[in-house]
Image (cartoon, rainbow, N blue to C red):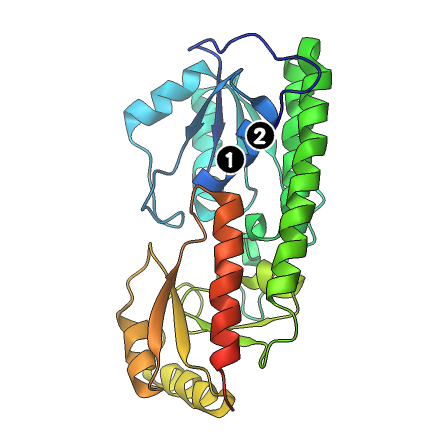
Amino acid sequence: MLPAACGSPRAADPDERLAVTILPQRQLLKRIAGDRFRVDVLIPPGFNPATYSPDPAQIRRLSRTRIWFRIGRLPFELNWTPRIASAHPALRVVDTSVGTDWLVPERKGVGGGAGVDPHIWLSPRLAKIQAGHMMQALVRLDPENRETYRSRYKNLEREIDDLDARIRFILTNPASRNFLVFHPSWGYFAREYGLIQVAIEKEGKGPAPASLAETVALARREGLRVVFVQRQFDTSAAEVVAREIGGRVVKLDPLAEDWFGNLEETARMLGKALRENSP
């Protein structure tokens, strides 16, 4: 728990709301905002950001929201930002991806909208950029408490740096750098730590038989024994691959609310799988 440095903002007003797109953002925002605002999440737990549609009541609730912090390029955001902005012209929309060095998959559409991989919150380095945009927006919204927000952001930066160091230690000198996933959510994490993500899903769709055969052949060649799947997706194709390579399916959740704990646990699970690889 971070200390409330430089004093604490006044208690939360139930009508003072902020919004984020996905659960992991809420932990980062709450580290900076504290209890000053209520933080709503637009995509509820268990739903797919590529297909989720908010109900009318959820859209109406945004009338009481001061700022919506977007990830940047999630399909939900690309589909719904114009409609939400039209319904609530006073709502400030902050794109926390500004300054991001995007990953562009080889084939347009893999992993997200507009031809880029949208999963930037899974990189500690890029998460600091997103948190910085949150802090700056809060300072502009509530300048009376700007030093508190700035101090909390500095604490958050140090906490993220500590997490990054732990992950690097966990992933030191793996036997292999390849890991097999169904949905390509972990590209930024892989880039950050020198790993290679091998995806079963192509262009947001389940694999064709020929593509599935290629993936199985690659997995056998590389000695991959684990297929990582996302909780929000059907796992049947991943289970087929796991049977073919004599391996197992393991669930990871890129949308887990505990951003810190989830990234560290993901590193441990990946590290274990990489040690099991035996080309």
Q: Which residue is mark 2?
A: 31
Callout count: 2
Q: In percent of the image, x 57 and y 66: which residue is there? A: 105
- Residue 72, image x, y percentages: 57, 42
Q: The disc labelled 1 sits on which kind of residue? A: Gln
Q: In percent of the image, x 33 and y 34: which residue is there? A: 54
Q: In percent of the image, x 55 and y 57: which residue is there? A: 117
In the depicted view, which residue is nearer to us: 22 or 266? 266
Q: Which mark is residue 17?
A: none
- Callout 2: SS: helix
- Callout 1: SS: helix
Q: Looking at the picture, does residue 95 appear above or below residue 151?
A: below
The local crowd at label 1, few if under 14, some if 14 to 19, many if 20 or more residues have their Cα within 10 Å, is some
In the depicted view, which residue is nearer to us: 28 or 5? 5
Q: In percent of the image, x 63 and y 30: which residue is there? A: 134
Q: Are marks 2 and 1 in contact (CB under 8 Å)?
A: yes
Task: Answer yes or no: is residue 264 visible.
Answer: yes
Q: Looking at the picture, does residue 25 appear above or below residue 88?
A: below
Q: Looking at the picture, does residue 112 appear above or below residue 276?
A: above
In the depicted view, which residue is nearer to us: 267 or 50? 267
How far is mark 2 from mark 1, CA to CA?
Answer: 6 Å
Q: Which residue is mark 1?
A: 27
Quadrant (top left/top right/bottom left/bottom right) for the N terminus: top right
- Residue 33, image x, y percentages: 58, 22
- Residue 73, image x, y percentages: 54, 47
